[in-house]
Amino acid sequence: MNKSLQLSLDHTLLVWSNQKVLNPIHIKKAKGVNLYDDQGKRYIDFSSQLMNVYIGHGRQEITEVVRNQMTSLSYVCPPFTTETRGLLVEKLASITPDHINKTFFALSGAESNENAIILARLYSGKHKIIKHYRFYQGATMGAISAGGGPRKNHINNQQAPNFIHFENPYFYRCPWYSFSFEECGDRTIKNLENTLLYEGPDNIAAILLEDESGTSGCIEYPPYYLKKVNNLCKKYDMLLTID
């Protein structure tokens, strides 16, 4: 067995895996959309790893930019600013809709969701967060509690409070036996509004959604769905955050 693979097996807890039967693919190099293991076998990287290598692997122009940055400055802690950070937030402000012009940098999706929850509660003065069932938000405590997947239940019996779940427009297994994709979406919106009214709009800080489900089965929304969710947020004076 490859020595570095054995070291990883000996000293690492690998995520999303049964630790007793680990048999990970040991990646040696990557180029473009392809990954290569230590035996030279090629894999097509359809998911861009954790959806963060959209430009592909091994792009030398990116390597050169990173190298140039590292020669002048490798890291500063969050209270400091740099020229590169300033240019990035300016670009983000120029392409973000609805006059949103502030960026908060986080290290992962779970951390960004945790901070979105904190900011929503601080800004609104409310405490409840509304979420879909069958959705994944991350592996930190608040993100696990927010996530609506039943897989979390057997490992977490001390979930954080004030996370409320409602159905999603999962037409393949629509709980209302809808005859069309659009009907399932409309019934889900009605279920959401009923949930809001039961929980009390004055208690709800935000609705937290994924733009589309991934790990729960790639559940696709009807085209109008997010717009209708946003309309409910405006109607009941709540925030909408999209993961």
Image (cartoon, rainbow, N blue to C red):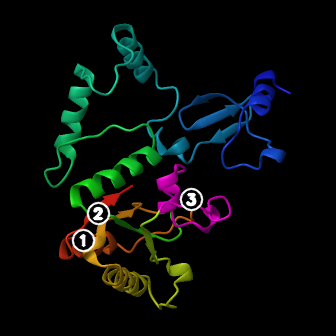
- Residue highlighted by disc 3: 215
Please name the residue shown 53% across and 64% down the image: 218
Nearer-N-terminus badge (3/2): 3
Question: Which residue position is annotated with label 1?
Answer: 233
> Horizontally, is 217 left or right of 210 in the view?
right
Instruction: Please report the residue visible at 24 percent of the width from the left and 71 percent of the height from the top.
Output: 233
Q: Which residue is mark 2?
A: 240
Q: Could you classify mark 1 by the number of other residues whose Cα lies within 10 Å: few (under 14), some (14-19), or many (20 or more)?
A: many
Q: Quadrant of the C terminus?
A: bottom left
Measuring from the top left, give residue 13's x and y in whole percent: 71, 38
* Amino acid type at mark 1: Cys
- Residue 49 position, x and y percent, is 55, 42
Residue 236, above or below 197? above
Residue nearer the viewer, 226 or 36: 226
Give the main secondary structure of the magenta stretch.
loop
Quadrant for the N terminus, please. top right
Question: What segment is highlighted magenta in the picture?
Answer: 136-160
Dot placed on the residue nearer the N-terminal end, 2 or 1: 1
- Residue 152: say if magenta: yes
Q: Position of residue 200 (x, y in %)?
A: 30, 79
* Amino acid at dot 2: Leu
Mark 3 lies on a secondary structure that is: loop
Residue positioned 61% across, 68% down in the render: 150
Marks 3 and 2 sit apart, C-alpha to C-alpha, by 21 Å
Tell me where residue 8 sits by quadrant: top right
Q: Is residue 46 above or below residue 81?
A: below
Q: In the drawing, does residue 150 fall left or right of residue 140?
A: right
The mark closer to the camera, 3 or 1, is: 1
